[in-house]
Image: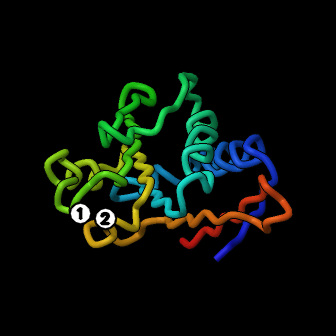
């Protein structure tokens, strides 16, 4: 497990961008989608990290969390897709199956980022990269700890 500390939203976005560039280097060797499972309290930096991740992939449009629509798909070139899923409002993990999650997760051309992934843990395949976001010390309002378990 590796832990990073950021001290501003901009640093969290930069970490997300760096992480995305590293993920792109490894993606062609995969047999299924690259899935990144984000967990942490409300406001801990998950969406901010995803914004940076998208920037690192070269997706220029503004990134909004799909809290109410559950999932957004973004094209990355002609053959690759990036899926941003927010599982916060799902009643049960199986609800994601209705959105064709099984096929999305099986396709090695896909990159999937799941916020509130701990809520759907039982349907996530093996090989998921977990990122846990935590608030820093009370004296440092913008500090975040991001633990990555591969």
Say the numbered circle drawn on residue 146: none
Q: Quadrant of the N terminus?
A: bottom right
Tag 2–tag 1 contact (CB < 8 Å): yes
Badge 2: how crowded within 10 Å, few (<14), some, or many (20+)?
many
Quarter occupied by residue 105: bottom left
**Residue 89 percent coordinates (x, y):** 31, 51
SS at circle 2: helix
**Above or below, 36 relative to 1:** above
Which residue sits furthest left? Answer: 98
18 with respect to 129 (left or right): right
Number of numbered markers: 2
Q: Position of residue 23 (x, y in %)?
A: 56, 51
Measured in 3D between alpha carbons, the distance from the residue under mark 2 to the one under mark 1, in whole angstroms, is 4 Å
Which image quarter holds the C terminus? Answer: bottom right
Q: Residue at x 56, y 52 (%)?
A: 46
- Identified at 34% across, 65% down, the residue is 119
Q: Name the residue rendered at 18%, 47% in the picture.
A: 100
Q: Position of residue 59 (x, y in %)?
A: 54, 28
Q: Secondary structure at mark 1?
A: helix
- The residue most toward the top is 61
Q: Residue furthest bottom?
A: 1
Q: Residue at x 44, y 27 (%)?
A: 77
Read off the residue under disc 2.
120
Residue 115 in the image: state x and y as whole percent: 44, 53
Q: Which residue is mark 1?
A: 93
Q: Quadrant of residue 93?
A: bottom left
């Amino acid at each position: 497990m590796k832990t990073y500390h950021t001290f501003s939203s901009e640093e969290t976005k930069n970490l997300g961008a760096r992480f995305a560039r590293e993920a792109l280097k490894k993606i062609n060797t995969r047999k299924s989608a690259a899935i990144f499972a984000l967990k942490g309290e409300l406001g801990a930096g998950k969406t901010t990290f995803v914004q940076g991740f998208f920037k690192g992939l070269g997706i220029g449009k503004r990134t909004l969390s799909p809290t109410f629509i559950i999932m957004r798909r973004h094209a990355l070139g002609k053959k690759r897709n990036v899926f941003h899923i927010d599982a916060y409002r799902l009643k049960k993990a199986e609800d994601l199956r209705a959105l064709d999650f099984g096929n999305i997760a099986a396709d090695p051309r896909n990159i999937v980022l799941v916020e509130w992934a701990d809520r759907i843990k039982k349907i996530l395949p093996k090989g998921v990269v977990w990122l846990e976001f935590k608030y820093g010390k009370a004296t440092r309002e913008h500090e975040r700890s991001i633990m990555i378990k591969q």
